Image (cartoon, grey):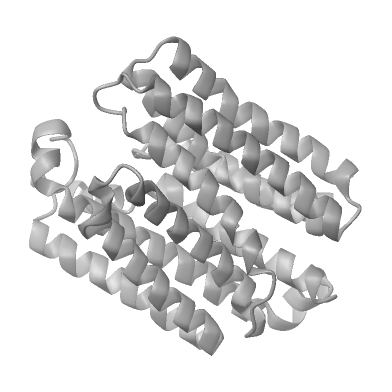
Amino acid sequence: MRIVLKGYLQLTRPANLPTAAADILAGITIILYLQNIDVLTFLCEQGADVFLLVFSSVALYAGGVVFNDVFDAELDAIERPERAIPSGRVPKREAICFGAILLLIGITLAFKCTLLSGMISMVLTIAILAYNGYFKQFGFVGPLNMGICRGLNLLLGMSILGSLTHWYISLVPVVYIFAITLISRGEVHGNNKKHIVWAGILYAIVVLSIALIVMQKKDNVLVLLPFLLLFGFLIYSPLIKAYKENSPKNIKKAVMGGVLSLVVMNACWVAGFSNWYLALAVLLLLPISMLLSKLFAVT
């Protein structure tokens, strides 16, 4: 029983789930500031909506990675036989049911928040399945599709008021995830220095974009700066190491560093559009992710 339960948990990539929650918290913080609504007051009055979107996002992410393993089952049997489906701990048919239930839970919770949130969750679900089932195989469209999923997740948080403005901010995580997905292309066989160089350029665009957007909307650079420096350090350190020694092991660490640092990127948004202590609260999701990453695979 314990082995089976662990298999289902492995399918959901528990270490990655806090990053989905962080997207929602960042999106909510951004839109509340832009609409001149105090974050703490909103949390006290409409905290239930925040929880609905957080758990919706977590369920959608979990369902998405379950279907990732479903569609990759035959390839994983060769390259990653330790995963839950090829190892036999979770039958493929049961994994499909599990993933579908998670996606339906995510959509239902989003609709309970606002109609717009529900609609975005449906578009996000389509994007998730499109990536897993088809677009993953393409060198450009695949990473772009994955990035769009993360951008939609930020938009899901921004939809909490039932309207959507400043949607262009969601393009930043699209670029960031595009970069991580490029790096991951060498995770099994290595030899992807060209992708790593492009990822480094895209990372720089992301860091600069966050700083410029915050400077344009709010004079909060001094609060943002320490979070932004931490973000840069965490994403570039493993990336540089993976470039110097272009092995699957180092590439996997660069991918893991990029994924877990999503929490820090979202803390940057919160620091820029709110204050340091709320950003620090979001940042506390990082040690949770890091702890879970020691128990469960990130990629």
Choose between 183 and 30: the one closer to the eye. 183
Which quarter of the image is occupied by the C terminus? top left
Q: Is residue 17 visible?
A: yes
Image location of residue 14, percent across then percent down: 40, 49
Choose between 224 and 11: the one closer to the eye. 224
Q: Residue at x 9, y 63 (%)?
A: 93
Image location of residue 203, percent across then percent down: 58, 36
In-image side of 171 versus 137 (left or right): right
> Relative to 39, does residue 274 appear above or below in the rendering?
above
Choose between 123 and 62: the one closer to the eye. 123
Q: Is residue 63 visible?
A: no
> Relative to 37, does residue 268 appear above or below in the rendering?
above
Residue 100 in which image quadrant? bottom left
Choose between 149 and 234: the one closer to the eye. 149
> Relative to 176, does residue 160 appear above or below in the rendering?
below
Q: Residue at x 41, y 69 (%)?
A: 124
